[in-house]
Image (cartoon, helix red, strand yellow):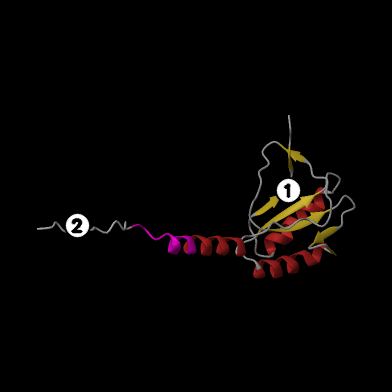
Amino acid sequence: MKRQRVQHSTEETGIDLAPMLDFVMNLLIFFIITAVFAKEVGLTVSRPSATNAEKKEAGNIVVAIDSAGDIWIEKRRVDVRAVRANIERLHAQKPDDAVVVAAEKGAQTGILVQVIDQVRQGGVQSVSIAATERTG
C-alpha cells in the first residue's frame, strides 16, 4: 500500500487592516475640515508685555485699539458706540469664540474701559486683554 500524502493548507488567517485604515483616514479628513484656524489681526498693534501672558488657541473675536484711540473690528474702523452691536453680531455667528481686546501701549485707558464695557453689554462676560509675553 502506498501512503497518501495529505497536504495541509498553509494559508494563515490574519487581521484585515483595510477597514481600520479607512476609518483613520476618515477621522483625519474630519479633523482637517473642522479645524479652527486662528484669525490674524489686520492691524499691527504694539502690545504691552506681561509676565503672566498666556496663549489662547481657540478662535477669537479681536477688537484692536490703536494709539490714536481708533477702534478696529474685523479690519473696519468703528465708533465706540458701535462696538456693542458688532460684538452682538459676531457673538451670534460664533458663540464659542472668545473676545480679545488688543490695545497698543499708547492707547488711552478710558477707551479701553469703554470698549470692555461695550463688549460685556454685548453679551460676552469673559474678555481678555492681549499682551506679549515678557522675556527675561
Q: Amino acid at mark 2?
A: Arg
Residue at (87, 57) in percent of width and height: 70
User: Which part of the image, by quadrant, shows the N terminus?
Assistant: bottom left
Left or right for 30, reference 120: left
Above or below 90: residue 9 = above
Which of 78/121 is in front?
Answer: 78
Which of 56/114 is in front?
Answer: 56
Q: Which residue is mark 1?
A: 130
Q: Which residue is mark 2?
A: 5
Residue 104 rendering spot, x and y as whole percentages? 83, 47
- Quadrant housing residue 114: bottom right
- Quadrant housing residue 98: bottom right
Residue at (49, 60) in percent of width and height: 24
Asked if the magenta segment contains residue 27, the reply would be no
**What is the number of the mark on residue 41?**
none
**Which residues make up the magenta segment?**
14-22
